[in-house]
């Protein structure tokens, strides 16, 4: 009977802290990106989750430059070198870099790859800035991992 009580407590703990979801996400990301240094990669993902929690910003899918280019190219299926404002806004939402109620102004121009990369980098930097002063050592680590080049 004690074993089932312990199993129940363990299950409740895992559910309460959403451990299964976190482990599933970490495993999926690991298998999708297949980084050279998997342990360091997992540590960086957990740090990003912590930053999201500290700043209150939805967990963004931090990506390197090649991932940003790939995302842009998927949206630019015709190969014209531009995407629509609607695609741009949805991509920022998907990445966790734009809130539902944020009022982005459509200037009527198509979004180029350079503008898309610039905006993603700017918004990621802003997220890093929000953590400044809360835990300077973690901030330095996170800033080094998250700023896109």
Image (cartoon, rainbow, N blue to C red):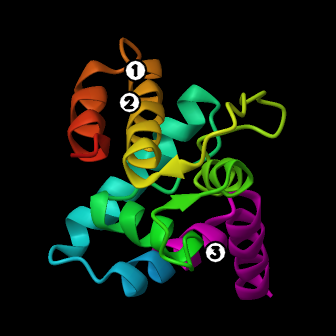
Q: Report the front residue among 33 and 69.
A: 69
Q: Report the front residue among 115 and 101.
A: 115
Q: Report the front residue among 58 and 77.
A: 77
- Residue extending farthest to the right is 101
In x, y percent, where is residue 83?
59, 59
Q: In this view, does 63 lie to the left or right of 94?
A: left
Q: Does 21 lie within the magenta span?
A: yes
Q: Does 144 lie within the magenta span?
A: no
In three-dimensional space, the C-alpha distance between marks 2 and 3, rounded to whole angstroms, equals: 30 Å
Q: Could you tell me which residue is drawn at 63 percent across and 51 percent down?
A: 88
Q: Residue 56 lies in what quarter of the image?
A: top right
Q: Earlier in the sequence, mark 3 or mark 1?
A: 3
In three-dimensional space, the C-alpha distance between marks 3 and 1, rounded to whole angstroms, equals: 30 Å
Q: Earlier in the sequence, mark 2 or mark 3?
A: 3
**Dot 1, crowdedness within 10 Å: few (<14), some or many (≥20)?**
few
Please identify, in this view, whether the residue under mark 2 or under mark 3 is nearer the observer.
Answer: 2
Magenta extent: 1-26
Q: Looking at the image, do the residues carrying marks 1 and 2 touch, with CB atoms under 8 Å apart?
A: yes
Q: Could you tell me which residue is drawn at 39 percent across and 87 percent down?
A: 31
Dot 1 corresponds to which residue? 129
In three-dimensional space, the C-alpha distance between marks 1 and 2, rounded to whole angstroms, equals: 6 Å
Q: Could you tell me which residue is drawn at 80 percent across and 88 percent down?
A: 1
Main SS of the magenta segment? helix
Residue 20 image label: 3
Dot 2 corresponds to which residue? 125
SS type, badge 1: helix
């Amino acid at each position: 009977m004690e074993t089932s009580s312990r199993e129940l407590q363990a299950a409740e703990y895992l559910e309460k802290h959403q451990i299964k979801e976190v482990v599933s996400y970490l495993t999926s990301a690991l298998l999708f990106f297949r980084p050279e240094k998997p342990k360091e990669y997992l540590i960086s993902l957990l740090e990003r989750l912590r930053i999201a929690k500290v700043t209150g910003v939805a967990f963004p899918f931090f990506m390197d430059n090649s991932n940003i280019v790939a995302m842009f190219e998927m949206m630019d299926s015709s190969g014209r070198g531009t995407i629509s404002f609607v695609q741009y806004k949805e991509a920022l939402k998907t990445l966790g870099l734009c809130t539902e109620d944020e009022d982005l102004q459509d200037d009527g121009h198509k979004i180029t790859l350079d503008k898309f990369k610039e905006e993603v980098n700017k918004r990621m930097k802003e997220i890093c800035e929000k953590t400044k002063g809360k835990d300077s050592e973690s901030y330095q680590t996170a800033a080094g991992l998250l700023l896109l080049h």
